[in-house]
Amino acid sequence: MEQSDPERFYTDLAQDTITLITRHEPLDGRLVLDIGAGSEQFGREFTARGANYVAVDLERESFPVGSAAVGVVGRGEQIPVADGSVDIVMANNLMEHVLEPGVVGEEMLRVVRPGGLVFISYTAWASPWGGHETSPWHWLGGNYAAKRYERKHGHPPKNVFGESMHATTVSGGLRWARRQSDAWLIEAAPRYHPDWADGVLSVPGLREVLTWNLMMVLRRT
């Protein structure tokens, strides 16, 4: 649906993100920084809820238009924002597209104020949709899946394994979050599963396949 109906896909994703964040922090009047923004629907939905929304992305084309939202050119590994200057910082489906997700996570913790919220959500590589548009053939290897996609469609996939898509893990994300000394993990869950499925995160191996998309919320100390 992301490529066939991006308006609906990103609007639904933005609204779901708002629901998950507002479990822990209201949006009204909060300064929200969106790393790797990627779509204007987030700016529209967040500003409609009273947030002061700022998108950080490498491409100006990804910035919100026609709203009160703001866009800043930058990358997650070096966020062009002062220390402790935002209330909420989030990254939706970004970590699988960067080489060092831990570095991006550290930057997110740097820019959020004490008591502020860090929201991270990403697709695990071993999950059924870990290869994005090349799924499920990524289970046979990212390079194989990319070559198969190009043979079938006549052009390379949007997400190129080893360049713009990498093999993220659930265990790696949880390990990173739990070892932070200046933040605590207040929620971790398989994002698109019912609440009763949260227990899958405690089962090594199985969680890599069944979690699908890992959602983590941290509170800065």
Image (cartoon, helix red, strand yellow):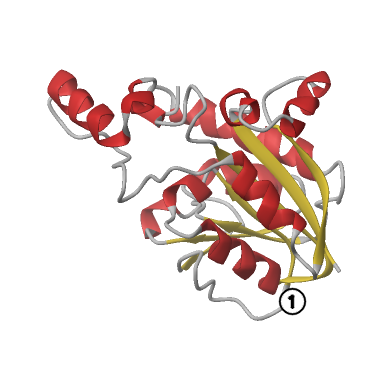
State the residue in front, 68 or 12. 12
Residue 221's spot in the image, x, y percent? 86, 69
Residue situated in front as seen by the camera: 68 or 91: 91
Q: Quadrant of residue 190?
A: top right
Residue at the disc numbered 1: 84
**Amino acid bearing label 1:** Gly
* In front of the other: 158 or 66: 158
In the rendered image, which quarter is residue 198 located in?
Answer: top right
Q: Residue at x 18, y 30 (%)?
A: 147
Q: Quadrant of the N terminus?
A: top left
Numbered marks: total: 1
Image coords of residue 177 (percent x, y): 72, 55
Asked if residue 68 can be seen in this view, the reply is yes
**How far from the left and from the top, in percent, is residue 28?**
83, 54
Disc 1 is placed on an element classified as: loop
Which residue occupies 67% across, 33% down? Answer: 204
Q: Residue furthest front?
A: 204
Specify whether 68 is left or right of 178.
left
Q: Nearer the viewer, residue 83 or 144?
A: 144
Residue 132, image x and y in percent? Answer: 41, 30
Query: In the shown orientation, is residue 167 left or right of residue 21?
Result: left
